[in-house]
Amino acid sequence: MKPPQMHRQAFPRAALLAAVLGLAFLLTACVSTVKSFPLQEKFGSTATYSRLFDARPEQTCEAARRALLSQGYIINTARVDLVEGQKSFQPEAEAHLQMVIRVVCAPESADGKISLGFVTALQDSYQLKKSNNSASLGVGAIGSVSLPFSSSNDSMVKVGSVTISSDAFYDSFFELVSRYLATVDDLPLSQ
């Protein structure tokens, strides 16, 4: 009588399957999960970021440019339909903030005498990052004497960026634009 034959292929397949499953388990354990955030945009009220003005778009943008200049903003872009300015703040010794305000002026009436000003303020936050670099000098003739030399490199690293959503912030800006609009009312139409 012949001894029962063992299936040699069954064992390697089982070992291969176990190895593949083990590898898959290790890979899923090593993969970090992506943090999910709730939806930030609501597309609700339009009152926060826009206002109607009884002026042509170029007058509204000129008033916005003057409003930004009056608050110490550096104007990056000034066109008849767009103004962008930026200003830097340093609330702490190792922190820096940069505010960029963008105003888009669009006609709202057929005759162009009413405009809609859209404003967005973006605030970037930076923190001081210190990195120490060190090296040592060994002098072989004297022995194993090491003289440490160190230096540090400081750099500002962007740590956050947020669109300002405060109604009070935009209300005060639009109020300032309205005050300057009275002074630019007599500007000639641009060609």
Image: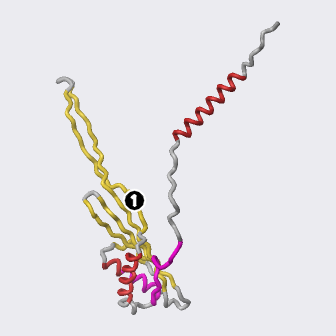
Residue at point 33%, 69% (across, down): 87
From this viewpoint, which residue is outermost toward the right? 1
Is residue 81 in view from this perspective?
Answer: no
How many numbered marks are there?
1
From this viewpoint, which residue is outermost toward the left? 142
Left or right of 104? Residue 85 is left
Mark 1 is surrounded, within 10 Å at the Cα level, by few (under 14), some (14 to 19) or many (20 or more) other residues, namely few
Q: Quadrant of residue 190?
A: bottom left
Is residue 71 in view from this perspective?
Answer: yes
Query: Could you tell me residue 116's position as x and y percent?
Result: 48, 83
Query: Could you tell me residue 41's position as x and y percent?
Result: 51, 67
Asked which secondary structure carries label 1, the reply is: strand
Q: Quadrant of residue 170?
A: bottom left
From this viewpoint, which residue is outermost toward the top? 1
Indicate the amino acid at tag 1: Gly
Residue at point 47%, 85% (across, down): 52
In reply to whether residue 49 is colored magenta, the answer given is: yes
Query: Could you tell me residue 158's position as x and y percent?
Result: 37, 57
Q: Which residues are magenta?
A: 43-65
Please, is residue 111 above or below residue 9 in the view?
below
Left or right of 92? Residue 107 is right
Residue at point 55%, 35% (across, down): 26
In reply to whether residue 158 is colored magenta, the answer given is: no
Q: Which residue is mark 1?
A: 160
Query: Could you tell me residue 151's position as x and y percent?
Result: 24, 44
